Amino acid sequence: MDELYERILLLEYHQKLLLDMIQPVNKDFDLLIIKKRLAEKEVEEFFQLCEELSAEMEKQKAEKFVFHFPLFKQFISKLNGKLQPEETIQACLKQNIYPELMKVLRLNIK
């Protein structure tokens, strides 16, 4: 069992080195998923959060909201703890994931 564990550690280390070597081309969010070791379920939860916030943003726009800080607070509170808000927003913008939502959220970063 120890040998298997050692092999897993070695694979993880080599994967980390490989990730540092490659230059992503518009795949910043995908790279972030790998670096932060998010599981598929965690990524699905992130996309579900973005769907909910996008719908809320559209509702707020229809009601002529100008400031979306509550939306940003909700994003931060529900964002997976492995992810940093600013880094995640930037990666999504570069990869064109929920661009309208991410632009609005980026406005709230200090």
Image (tube, rainbow, N blue to C red):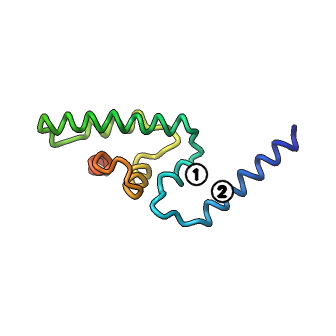
In the rendered structure, are the residues bearing label 2 and label 1 in contact, judged by CB atoms less than 8 Å apart? no
Within the image, what quadrant is residue 19 found in? Answer: bottom right
Q: Residue at x 45, y 61 (%)?
A: 26
Disc 2 element: helix
Which kind of residue does numbered mark 1 sit on? Lys
SS state under label 1? helix
Residue 8 screen position, x and y as percent: 77, 46
Q: Amino acid at mark 2?
A: Lys
Horizontal arrangement in the rendering, residue 97 relative to residue 57 (left or right):
right
Residue 25 screen position, x and y as percent: 48, 64
Q: In this figure, which residue is indicated by the disc labeled 1? A: 35
Real-space Cα separation, disc 2 to disc 1, in angstroms: 7 Å
Question: Where's the N terminus, which quadrant?
Answer: top right
Numbered mark located on residue 59 in the image: none
Crowd rating for badge 2 (residues with CA inside 10 Å; few <14, some 14–19, many 20+): few
36 relative to 78 in the view: left or right: right
Residue at x 24% of width, y 38% of height: 57
- At a point 47% along the width and 52% down the height, the residue shown is 29
**34 or 79: nearer the viewer:** 34
**Residue tagged by mark 2?**
16
